[in-house]
Image (cartoon, grey):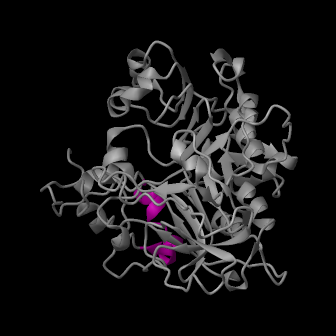
Amino acid sequence: QGEVLLAVLSNYMVDMDWLLTACPSLRKVPHVLVLHGEDGASLERLKKTKPANWILHKPPLPISFGTHHSKAMLLVYPQGIRVVVHTANLIHVDWNNKSQGLWTQDFPWKKANDTSTNIGFENDLVDYLRALKWPEFRVNLPVAGDVNINAAFFRKFDYSSSTVRLIGSVPGYHVGPNMKKWGHMKLRSVLEECVFEKQFCKSPLIYQFSSLGSLDEKWMSEFACSLSAGKADDGSQLGIGKPLIVWPTVEDVRCSIEGYAAGSCIPSPQKNVEKDFLRKYWSRWKADHVGRCRAMPHIKTFTRYNGQNIAWFLLTSSNLSKAAWGALQKNNTQLMIRSYELGVLFLPKTLQSVPQFSCTDKSRSNLVTTNLSLSFEYYGYANMFLRSSFIPLTYTQDKLALGKNIKTKLVTLCWKGDEEKDPSAEVVRLPVPYQVPPQLYGPEDVPWSWDRRYTKKDVYGSVWPRHG
């Protein structure tokens, strides 16, 4: 949309032919940096098919078995910057056949005399971008003149209206203060600063993702400890929540819109999936309320809930693995992470209603809204839901006076409470794509693993694997 001056596209898999066909306006962008995770023949094809002025960079992976997995876009406009964090590879099946998630928010350029650097979102973004180590390049932008495109360049925008916190992972052996900057320890440190309603004491957790690492009970306890951080409004600790894992069954995959082929994007082997200690966690992918039961999830979400009330909600590229989230080592003095990941954390906040900012929609400049002008949507399923399930969390002037302080209350789409009960709180309906609370597996349910043989034919008459 609009006049993009510079685009940074971060992803794992990139099909350049598909990308330029799906989004031909990218060819008009004068400066494009692609941060990717490709190698071998895929990388060679990427080099051959990219436009001549595009720059490719694969961030360094110093620890074996790591990937550059983050999925994001930074789009610089004459008016400001659009930040997008999402869950889809830049390939056809991810944008057409899966359940995915996307968050975006626009931010204006800073005023010339604005030298503030105490915005959490800004510092998290710049720290993350600095770790990618792309080769700095110089461009001429109509609004900023000659500038070096490095991590520090992205301090030129005013992120004070940010509605989320960034939770990133970068590879390394993180010690000292750096240990709390990345992975599950970053999530822990942000949650520790937050105050939640008393109803979330000991409330359960949901882990929902599309690839399962090789896990053990010790690490699961470490991870649950991070996701259970935070205080109740009476000062007590929330306490450890019991997690459930939302994961497709074999039958879900067999009956999906792709049949067994969908299972190739849920790439977890039997040895990881069929561990006895995981059995108590397995819960169904049920998404009737958003019409997505048969669109297999590539979205990744982690949340804490009580009924239809949400304490916090994370949309991320991170699967459930030590490589993505990190594992504590050396008597909990070091966090080892293998991969790059990026997610956005939705929290209840006290906010001031401000004019909504958009880089591309001039009609929005006069609309008074809260700074919850974010969007989070499911795309795919042959693009059926690209627009119809787009849920902008905005409030018009007759709802809120400009400058008024408001508290936000996070709920699911199925919440049936009374919005008028507390006029000082704004209910934010997050499009959580699965049933909450999740339904535990029944005795006939088998968790999908991609290296088992399945002889019962799928909706296309195929078995798995298709060959051999």
Residue at screen point 64% across, 81% down: 203
Q: Is residue 59 above or below residue 235?
A: above
Q: Residue furthest left?
A: 461
Residue at screen point 36% across, 68% down: 290
Q: Residue furthest top?
A: 52
**Which quadrant would residue 22 be assigned to in this image?**
top left
Q: Is residue 202 above or below residue 229?
A: below
* Main secondary structure found in the magenta portion: helix
Residue at screen point 76% across, 60% down: 190
Q: Does residue 460 appear to the left or right of 192 in the view shown?
A: left
Q: Estimate the x, y position of residue 455 in percent, counting from the top left.
A: 18, 61
Q: Estimate the x, y position of residue 57 in percent, counting from the top left.
A: 57, 24
Whether residue 209 is visible, yes or no, is: yes
Whether residue 286 is visible, yes or no, is: no
* Quadrant where the image shows the C terminus: top left
Q: Estimate the x, y position of residue 36 in percent, counting from the top left.
A: 52, 31
Q: Estimate the x, y position of residue 273 in percent, counting from the top left.
A: 45, 62
Q: Does residue 16 appear to the left or right of 178 in the view shown?
A: left
Q: Is residue 132 above or below residue 200?
A: above
Q: Does residue 263 appear to the left or right of 422 in the view shown?
A: left
Q: Nearer the viewer, residue 381 or 15?
A: 381
Task: Please give the range of residues in magenta.
Answer: 268-283
Q: Is residue 269 magenta?
A: yes
Q: Is residue 434 magenta?
A: no
**How many callouts does the rendering have?**
0
